[in-house]
Image: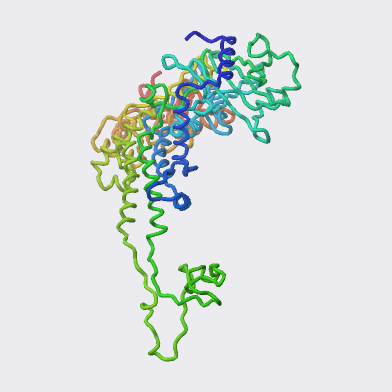
């Protein structure tokens, strides 16, 4: 496909609006999104229920719908939750740095922009939350990176995410898996909160009913459909369907549209499709949800759970059988009154009414003579129902739930209890579990990289930027207990020090997940530790053999004090020592060590010259 120009893009958009065009898979992806939305949220589930025509009347079907409490939302969330752990996995490395950025000034500025990407939440937070949500519930949706007006002489743009659902992404084109253009339709309702503020500002307060946007390389063009009242106030010489360069308005099939042309300044489209699993039914043109294999099982769960709720409501409680006296209402004859109407007291049954709830009781007058007392078992009898059906239904629903988990993760191990029961088998199952999550982790890394590339391009901060989101092939999400056990194993086996260092880094990454400043401090102190990888015994031997003023020995002895002193020193000048370039950090550490050595030399004038540290 040839590169679109502004004129060719406008003509394409006019044709799409005029003919109400939709991409060839539009019906399939929107139906898929609707189904997933219902299954995952548990909302509007009645539309997924089916009536058994041979045995169930319409009234009975309505009753079953009222009784049913759906569980697909709970089961779906169980399937989705492990994915939220991906960003904090031990098997992921996040690299973001600028070449030559000695004091991390540019990096801190860029991180500040990323931290405002989603309101008061960062780009990483957005991807770790909404991107995962959309990947499951609407895999054919898009995330478009937009930004508001700004003064480029004083400030940088602040990008934000604009989510485009499968319903709104009405037309698009991929060539060799690269997005060539994307057409979005947003419909607005008149009234408070209906029309976005940015749309109103761009149209000088005019009432907009719909917005068509075509995103393509370098530009985004909008066609805003105005309401009739607003359109009547415009000049009468509006072009009709045949666009002329410079025109601000156009008439398409009797509707007036305001034209907006926006230069993005980018050599790519700032939009990414969320889904990553290809749909074989469309020859990989579209995407499916990561829980696609569980959808048939979830649909079976709807029916099974509905029938179980009906069983519990109507048949799982003891049934009361009893003899009743005739209705004592005046003129009641077998439940009928002389005029043929039903008796209002007994409601046409001809029998005296009795309590119908467990909160009420039947009371009888105590006879004067004991011989007149009738055994209560002869008055009322409770018949317990056969519970085998209810037990079968409950077990069937439980099996369906486990089948869902097994279909997605090839594993039924989800709890610590299960892992403890079968350690060997669970270890194999967990490997399947990690393998199942690996493709999503790779897709997450791709979305992260695209986001950084796009945001840096929008803010003009791409130069000298290096960014990577590395997902190791040994993709695992271990807990602290798992890592401590691993550390003990490698220590007992006297494994190489770098193996222990790697495990300790994983432990620190988990411990400081919510405290990046502390993790940064840990990394710096870990890097400059003089006897890294040495055991306590080895360190003790080194200290016993080197001179008292040995550089490494002084650094080891005063390690915590030195870093505390550097923190205080740089804090006074409103700088963070741990944000400095590694060469600057090492230079500052060397100076502190040399100060200590000089101080001790003055205290110990008898030290031999050959014991002094060499340059």
Name which residue lies at 54% across and 76% down.
329
Left or right, residue 190 beside residue 540:
right
Looking at the rendered structure, the number of numbered marks drawn on it comes to 0
Residue 117 image offset from top left, x and y in percent:
56, 28
Left or right, residue 296 beside residue 213:
left
State the residue in front, 442 or 238: 238
Quarter of the image for residue 216 reads top right
Residue 134 image offset from top left, x and y in percent:
47, 32
Is residue 259 positioned above or below 507 on the image?
above
Name which residue lies at 41% across and 14% down.
176
**Quadrant of the frame with the C terminus:** top left
Is residue 585 positioned above or below 322 on the image?
above
State the residue in front, 561 or 19: 19
Residue 116 appears anywhere in the view: yes
Name which residue lies at 48% across and 36% down.
515
Left or right, residue 321 beside residue 412:
right
State the residue in front, 201 or 149: 201
Question: Please, which residue is most extreme toward the front here?
Answer: 339
Is residue 343 positioned above or below 401 on the image?
below
Left or right, residue 396 beside residue 468:
left
Residue 96 image offset from top left, x and y in percent:
47, 23
State the residue in front, 111 or 368: 368
Name which residue lies at 39% across and 90% down.
370
Residue 60 image offset from top left, x and y in percent:
44, 52
Is residue 19 positioned above or below 35 on the image?
above
Residue 544 appears anywhere in the view: no
């Amino acid at each position: 496909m040839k590169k679109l120009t502004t004129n060719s893009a406008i003509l394409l958009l006019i044709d799409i609006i005029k003919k109400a065009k939709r991409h060839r898979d539009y019906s399939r992806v929107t139906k898929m999104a609707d189904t997933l939305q219902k299954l995952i949220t548990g909302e509007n589930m009645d539309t997924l229920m089916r009536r058994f025509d041979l045995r169930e009347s319409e009234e009975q079907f309505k009753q079953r719908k009222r009784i049913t409490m759906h569980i697909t939302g709970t089961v779906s969330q169980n399937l989705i939750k492990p994915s939220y752990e991906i960003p904090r996995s031990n098997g992921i490395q996040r690299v973001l740095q600028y070449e030559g950025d000695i004091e991390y000034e540019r990096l801190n500025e860029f991180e500040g922009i990323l931290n405002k990407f989603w309101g008061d939440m960062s780009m990483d937070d957005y991807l770790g939350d909404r991107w995962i949500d959309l990947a499951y519930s609407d895999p054919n949706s898009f995330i478009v990176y937009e930004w508001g007006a700004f003064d480029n002489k004083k400030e940088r743009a602040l990008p934000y995410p604009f989510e485009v659902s499968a319903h709104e992404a009405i037309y698009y084109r991929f060539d060799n898996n690269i997005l060539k253009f994307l057409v979005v339709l947003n419909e607005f309702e008149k009234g408070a909160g209906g029309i976005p503020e940015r749309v109103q500002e761009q149209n000088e307060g005019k009432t907009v009913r719909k917005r068509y946007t075509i995103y393509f390389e370098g530009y985004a063009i909008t066609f805003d459909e105005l309401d009739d009242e607003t359109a009547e106030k415009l000049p009468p010489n509006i072009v009709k369907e045949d666009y002329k360069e410079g025109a601000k308005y156009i008439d398409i099939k009797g509707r007036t549209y305001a034209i907006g042309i926006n230069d993005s300044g980018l050599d790519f489209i700032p939009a990414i499709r969320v889904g990553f699993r290809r749909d074989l039914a469309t020859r990989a043109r579209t995407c499916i949800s990561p829980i696609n294999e569980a959808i048939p099982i979830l649909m079976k769960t709807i029916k099974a759970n509905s029938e179980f709720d009906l069983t519990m409501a109507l048949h799982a409680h003891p049934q009361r059988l009893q003899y009743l006296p005739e209705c004592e209402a005046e003129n009641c004859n077998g439940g009928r009154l002389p005029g043929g109407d039903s008796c209002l007291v007994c409601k046409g049954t001809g029998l005296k009414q009795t309590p119908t709830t467990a909160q009420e009781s039947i009371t009888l007058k105590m006879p004067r003579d004991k011989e007149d007392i009738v055994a209560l078992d002869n008055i009322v009898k409770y018949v317990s129902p056969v519970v085998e059906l209810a037990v079968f239904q409950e077990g069937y629903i439980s099996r369906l739930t486990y089948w869902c988990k097994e279909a997605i993760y090839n594993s039924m191990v989800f709890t610590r209890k299960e892992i403890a029961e079968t350690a060997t088998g669970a270890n194999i199952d967990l490997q399947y579990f990690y393998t199942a999550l690996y493709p999503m982790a790779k897709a997450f890394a791709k979305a992260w990289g695209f986001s950084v590339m796009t945001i840096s391009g929008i803010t003009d901060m791409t130069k000298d930027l290096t960014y990577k989101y590395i997902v190791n092939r040994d993709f695992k999400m271990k807990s602290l207990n798992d890592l401590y056990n691993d550390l003990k194993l490698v220590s007992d086996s006297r494994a190489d020090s770098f193996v222990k260092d790697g495990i300790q880094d994983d432990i620190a990454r988990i411990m400081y997940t919510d405290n990046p400043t502390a993790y940064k401090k840990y990394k710096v102190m870990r890097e400059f530790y003089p006897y890294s990888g040495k055991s306590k015994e080895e360190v003790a031997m080194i200290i016993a053999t080197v001179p008292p003023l040995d550089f490494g020995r002084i650094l080891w002895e005063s390690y915590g004090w030195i870093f505390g002193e550097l923190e205080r020193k740089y804090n006074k000048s409103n700088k963070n020592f741990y944000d400095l370039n590694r060469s600057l950090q090492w230079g500052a550490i060397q100076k502190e060590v040399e100060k200590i050595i000089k101080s001790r030399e003055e205290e110990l004038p008898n030290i031999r010259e050959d014991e002094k540290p060499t340059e």
